[in-house]
């Protein structure tokens, strides 16, 4: 069954992990290789709307997924970011946590990752040719699925 991620309909084939209350999907516009998203299954716009069991499950899932993508994509660190509300850069109206494998020298300034996060999906609005192909996303999801 497809999953409604804010205003986006997500195919099951791009979801690579499901816990009781959360799921992980690949990104159609990753900032770095292995930039994936973890979100609660229930539709909630803001972090403060989540129940304690959903918060617990979400962050257990973030930890599991971060461990897998750091190792698979050859990272040595991880950036975890939750843009909670429009002024924090949130564009998709469904709570989601960004997980980005990091390595030495991936940005000229380390915190540039946050500037890229702010703009990476905005420049694509109305330009679907800038997204990754469904095929590429499905291939990545199939590879990541095997770790769980
Ligand atoms: W936010 O700017 O709301 O913190 O981040 C939204 C994220 O969701 C971006 O990384 C964007 O690339 C990603 N995204 C948006 N739509 C889809 C989609 N249909 N499939 C996968 N990722 C998506």
Image (tube, helix red, strand yellow):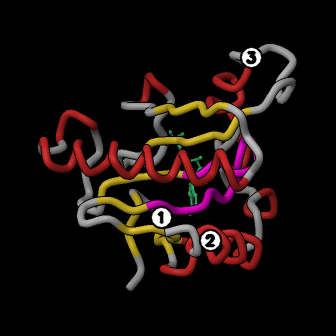
Q: Position of residue 55 (x, y in %)?
A: 23, 42
User: Could you tell me which secondary element the residue under label 1 belongs to?
Assistant: strand
The mark nearer the N terminus, 3 or 2, is 3
Q: Residue drawn at (70%, 75%), measured in percent from left and top?
A: 134
Magenta: main secondary structure equals loop
Above or below, 126 against 46 in this view is below
Q: Which residue is mark 2?
A: 141
The mark nearer the N terminus, 3 or 1, is 1
Above or below, 43 against 91 in this view is below
* Cα gap from disc 3 to disc 1, whole angstroms: 30 Å
Q: Position of residue 77 (x, y in %)?
A: 65, 31
Query: Ligand 1 closer than 8 Å to the CB at disc 1?
Result: yes
User: What numbered label is drawn on residue 147?
Assistant: none
Q: Which residue is mark 3?
A: 110
- Which corner quadrant holds the N terminus? bottom left
- Of residues 20 and 127, the one nearer the viewer is 20
- Of residues 20 and 30, the one nearer the viewer is 20
Q: Position of residue 126 (x, y in %)?
A: 69, 56
Dot 2 alpha-carbon crowd within 10 angstroms: few under 14, some 14 to 19, many 20 or more: many
- Of residues 125 and 23, the one nearer the viewer is 23
* Cα gap from disc 2 to disc 1, whole angstroms: 17 Å
Query: Ligand 1 closer than 8 Å to the CB at disc 2?
Result: no
Dot 1 alpha-carbon crowd within 10 angstroms: few under 14, some 14 to 19, many 20 or more: few
């Amino acid at each position: 069954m497809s999953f409604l991620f804010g205003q986006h309909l997500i195919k099951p084939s791009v979801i690579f992990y499901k816990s009781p209350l959360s799921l992980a999907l690949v990104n159609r516009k990753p900032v770095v290789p292995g930039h994936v998203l973890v979100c609660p299954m229930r539709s909630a716009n803001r972090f403060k709307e989540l129940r304690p069991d959903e918060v617990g499950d979400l962050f257990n899932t973030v930890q599991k997924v971060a461990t897998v993508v750091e190792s698979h994509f050859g990272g040595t660190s991880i950036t975890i970011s939750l843009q909670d509300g429009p002024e924090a850069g949130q564009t998709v109206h469904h709570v989601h946590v960004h997980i980005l494998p990091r390595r030495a020298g991936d940005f000229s300034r380390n915190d540039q990752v946050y500037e890229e996060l702010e703009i990476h999906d905005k420049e694509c609005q109305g330009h679907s040719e800038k997204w990754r192909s469904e095929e590429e996303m499905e291939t990545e999801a199939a590879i990541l699925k095997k770790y769980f």
